[in-house]
Image: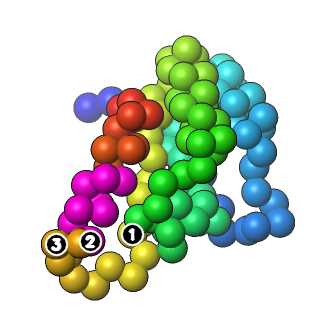
Amino acid sequence: MAFHYGVIEGLYDQDNQWSWESRNAYASFCAQKGFNFYIYAPKNDPYLREQWHQSWPERDFNQLNTLGLTLKQNHVRFGIGLTPFNVRDLNRKSRQQLKQKIASINQLNPE
């Protein structure tokens, strides 16, 4: 069994949030250090947590897409960590919202 090294961006800190430029630059750092994966899961991304049922604004979605492409070009697997906030029951509405969110994430081609 191979051991995998990687990064999970899971910061809560709004004041020290990574910029998109930093995230993209980190792709080459990960590749140089032999990291296998990068998971985008900052706790301060409301579209992964509190507002998970809403779509990312187009600009943010495009930035995520660019990040995924940059990571893949550097042979680093790309993932996204979704934490649906306040989902207590998976009723018909929340199931549909979750399906829509997963379809949106899948457009980014995570591995």
Q: Which mark is residue 84?
A: 1
109 and 37: which is toward the camera: 109
96 falls in the magenta region = yes
Image position of 31 with respect to 53: above or below: above
Report helix, strand or loop for mark 2: helix
Residue 20 in picture, x, y percent from top left: 73, 40
Residue found farthest to the right: 15
Classify the position of the N terminus by image quarter. top left
Residue 99, quarter of picture: bottom left
- CA neighbours of label 1 inside 10 A, class few (<14), some (14 to 19), many (20+): some
Instruction: Determine the CA span between mark 2 and mark 1.
Output: 10 Å
Q: Are marks 3 and 1 in contact (CB under 8 Å)?
A: no
Q: In this rendering, does residue 99 appear at all?
A: yes
1 falls in the magenta region = no
Residue found farthest to the top: 73
Query: Looking at the image, is mark 2 or mark 1 earlier in the sequence?
Result: 1
Residue 46 in picture, x, y percent from top left: 57, 65
Q: Are marks 2 and 3 in contact (CB under 8 Å)?
A: yes
Q: Which residues are magenta?
A: 94-101
Q: Which mark is residue 94?
A: 2
Q: Residue at x 60, y 50 (%)?
A: 57
Residue 109 in picture, x, y percent from top left: 39, 30
Query: Looking at the image, is mark 3 or mark 1 earlier in the sequence?
Result: 1
Q: In this rendering, does residue 4 appear at all?
A: no
Residue topped by disc 3: 92
Q: Are marks 2 and 1 in contact (CB under 8 Å)?
A: yes
Residue 2 in picture, x, y percent from top left: 33, 30
Image position of 41 with respect to 38: above or below: below
